[in-house]
């Protein structure tokens, strides 16, 4: 298995590292269910594992949004549209819309960016971008984390629960060993070549590593994407799943350099957990690799 997430990024808008300007105040009008499974509620439910192969059940937005609602985060819809010259504002065409969730202290936010032509991790479009800042008066995020579709919603939710519970979202309260300890406690193996920087599932289908992140995975000031900054490697955590070396990624997650290791450890602990997760929609690519039991 390769030691780093293969780069497959499209052009990145550096302004995505700022708190978006809200253009609309309504909650997202309807749940974002998988359109290929319109009757998910009527499908049989299973407890399945391992969770890193369980997919997102076609409910990645809903699961994460429910978690944030339970934490008291504010949910807002952001519309992006086109307005022709001399056109009345009410006649503007709404081309895309995303959903922004903001914590009560406004130091953390999560944005569902999938409908907004996001950039890619390993050729997969990013679905959720989570950001935090230490100063509420600054529009710039101190750090950001990115999750594609099919990252289990439970895992993103546990990351957000840890983020909500921490006092200062930028404080480094643990070292990188905390991340590796979180997965090895659940049976993952340290990489023999990088025992202090990487670990993998015993079936080699999922990997977590600390290494150089692609340029779009940035911290703070977008001016960091300068020639001077590019001259030195920026290290951050990345995780992904694939069924074989060189195979297409099932999902990917990437954390910019200043994401606290304690928060990545919360993600890692949830990802590697041996507890089963409830699913109605089983990923076609991993269906035969999942252990499952009827939920009722």
Image (cartoon, helix red, strand yellow):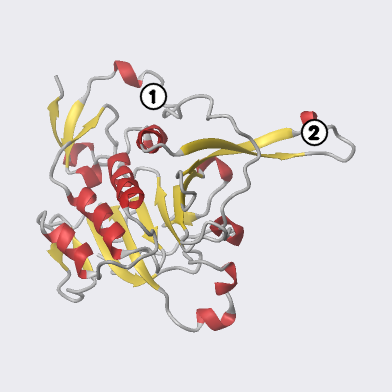
First in sequence: mark 1 vs mark 2: 1
Residue 132 percent location from the top left of the image: 45, 56
* Disc ID at residue 22: none
Q: Name the residue under label 2.
A: 89
Q: Which of 28 and 36 is in front in this view?
A: 28
Residue 263's image quarter?
bottom left
Q: Residue furthest right?
A: 86
The answer to whether one can see residue 124 in this image is no
Q: Which residue is drawn at the image coordinates 24% and 47% (left, top)? A: 52
The answer to whether one can see residue 177 in this image is yes
Q: Mark 1 points at which residue?
A: 37
Residue 72 percent location from the top left of the image: 41, 36
Neighbour tally class for label 2: few under 14, some 14-19, many 20 plus, Cα within 10 Å: few
Q: Which residue is drawn at the image coordinates 23% and 20% (left, top)? A: 44
Neighbour tally class for label 1: few under 14, some 14-19, many 20 plus, Cα within 10 Å: some
Q: Is residue 13 left or right of residue 173?
A: right
Residue 43 vs 131, above or below: the answer is above
Q: Which of 74 and 119 is in front in this view?
A: 74
Quadrant for the C terminus in the image: top left
Quadrant for the N terminus in the image: bottom left
Q: Which residue is drawn at the image coordinates 63% and 47% (left, top)? A: 21
Q: Is mark 1 on a helix, strand or loop?
A: loop
Alpha-carbon span between mark 1 and mark 2 = 36 Å
Residue 119 percent location from the top left of the image: 52, 54
Residue 132 vs 41, above or below: the answer is below
Q: Which residue lies furthest to the top in this view?
A: 42
Between marks 1 and 2 in the image, the one whose residue lies nearer the viewer:
2
């Amino acid at each position: 298995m390769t030691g780093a997430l293969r780069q497959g990024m499209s052009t990145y808008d550096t302004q995505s590292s700022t708190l978006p300007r809200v253009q609309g105040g309504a909650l997202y009008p309807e749940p974002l269910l998988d359109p290929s499974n319109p009757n998910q509620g009527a499908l049989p439910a299973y407890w399945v594992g391992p969770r890193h192969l369980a997919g997102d059940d076609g409910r990645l937005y809903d699961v994460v949004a429910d978690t944030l609602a339970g934490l008291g985060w504010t949910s807002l819809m952001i519309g992006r549209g086109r307005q022709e010259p001399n056109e009345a504002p009410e006649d503007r065409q709404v081309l895309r819309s995303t959903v922004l969730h903001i914590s009560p202290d406004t130091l953390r936010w999560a944005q569902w960016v999938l409908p907004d032509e996001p950039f890619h991790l390993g050729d997969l479009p990013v679905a959720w971008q989570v950001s935090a800042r230490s100063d509420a008066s600054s529009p710039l995020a101190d750090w950001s984390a990115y999750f594609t579709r099919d990252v289990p919603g439970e895992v993103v939710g546990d990351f957000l629960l840890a983020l909500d519970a921490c006092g200062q979202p930028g404080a480094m309260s643990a070292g990188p060993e905390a991340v590796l300890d979180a997965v090895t406690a659940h049976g993952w193996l340290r990489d023999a070549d990088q025992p202090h920087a990487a670990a993998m599932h015993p079936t080699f289908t999922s990997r977590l590593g600390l290494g150089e992140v692609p340029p779009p995975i940035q911290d703070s000031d977008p001016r960091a994407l300068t020639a001077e900054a590019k001259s030195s490697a920026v290290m951050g955590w990345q995780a992904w799943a694939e069924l074989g070396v060189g195979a297409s990624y099932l999902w990917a997650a990437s954390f910019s350099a200043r994401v606290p290791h304690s928060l990545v450890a919360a993600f890692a602990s949830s990802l590697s957990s041996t507890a089963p997760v409830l699913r109605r929609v089983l990923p076609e690519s991993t269906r035969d690799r999942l252990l499952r039991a009827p939920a009722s």
